[in-house]
Amino acid sequence: MENQSSSERSSRFIQTLWLTYAFSLIGFNNGILGPALLDLQFLVKVNLDTISNLFIVSGVGFIIGTITAMVLKKYVDTELFLGLSVLFGSVINIILPVVPVYAYVVIMTLLQGIFKGLIDFCVLIMCNVIWKDNKSFAFQFVCIGAGISSFIVPFIAKPFLSETHFKHSTDSDMYTESFGDLLTEFGVISDFHYTKSTMAIMTSMYWGSFVFGRIMNLIFSKYINLFVVLTVNLAGLLCATTMLVLATVSRPILFWIGTVLIGLFSSSLLPTALVWSDKYVPVSGFTITTTLIASGMGEIVVPRIGGAVFDTEGPPSLMIMMLVAALFEIAFFIGLALVGNALVIKSPPSEDEQSKQIVKENHNRFLQG
């Protein structure tokens, strides 16, 4: 029996390592588009406003991939589906910059987003099944894979980046979702006027703190209530975004520190929130799908809002929007906590609990004669 138990644990850890590797493809997609966006703009010969629409295209693809994975889950083996998604997603990443035509890049970005959604859903749903007794560990651990690859990618891209500065037109679609993607554009276009190489370093620092945050949350979530972990992260995120708002050319250190702190405190909000919500609503395929669709919707809706504000108020408005986004997340979290405590959804008692209740009732009847 002990050998069987040991074999089962080994199997679960091996599967988790595979899921972590698969999730690293998402980190690659998250980490590469930001630093390479300006060079990609030059490659396909379009303005910055047009190339920035790739974020929206990616978000649409992500939603399509998530919904597709949920629908096909009943008919296709999830492990096989994940393996094929990683394979084809990797091929898309390789061939995306081959043809310098905007329409081609849009199609490849859409496919990239679709496979990103497929992988995200499959990994989380498999973690939910494999680690029913310890979801916090699994969700936090596999997400580290994405953080590591996001941290490495800007260093890979840095030697290939041109130092040419591109003029920003007046109809920008800059937005605050996946903050790391926008660092390069903001640093180059804003009054800081950093080079793309410098911003590649800052992007790596952001993703490095992102990885560190996930590792710390993985450790702390074993000993600290998840509600407390989320509260600390959200409070830290508020402080970080406030620093970004206060950052100016005369105080660049606030820009660097704020960027690192955003990576640190935003890193584990999704996996931690998913596990915390399991206290109220059991995590299922529907729960994961809803969460991921909401994430994808942010990549579609926020650019429209961000573009208008960016045009009228200039680059500093991006940091104000980051602060507003943090305040919204805090308000949303408080609302969820209040609703969750008021309307706790309890699952039916287990057979063991029912048996104990019956024994207790019979014992009370016996004492009452």
Image: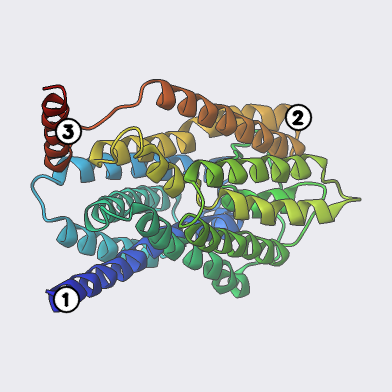
Q: Which residue is mark 2?
A: 313
Return the mark for residue 2.
Answer: 1
In percent of the image, x 22 and y 46: which residue is there? 69
Q: Specify whether 255 is left or right of 88.
A: right
- Please determine whether, in this image, residue 217 is positioned above or below residue 273: below
Q: Which residue is mark 3?
A: 360
In percent of the image, x 70 and y 65: which residue is there? 163
Pair 3/1: label in front = 3
- Please determine whether, in this image, residue 208 is positioned above or below residue 356: below
Kindly identify the amino acid type of the residue bearing the numbered disc 3.
Answer: Lys
Check contact, mark 2 vs mark 3: CB within 8 A: no
Q: Residues within 10 Å of mark 3 (few under 14, many from 20)?
A: few
Kindly identify the amino acid type of the residue bearing the numbered disc 1.
Answer: Glu
Disc 3 element: helix
Q: Specify whether 69 is left or right of 268.
A: left
Residue 58: image location, x then y, percent: 42, 45
Q: Residues within 10 Å of mark 1 (few under 14, many from 20)?
A: few
Q: Quadrant of the N terminus?
A: bottom left
Q: Residues within 10 Å of mark 2 (few under 14, many from 20)?
A: few
In percent of the image, x 11 and y 40: which residue is there? 351
Q: Earlier in the sequence, mark 2 or mark 1?
A: 1
User: Residue 2 occupies which quadrant of the picture?
Assistant: bottom left
Q: CA distance from mark 2 to mark 3?
A: 68 Å
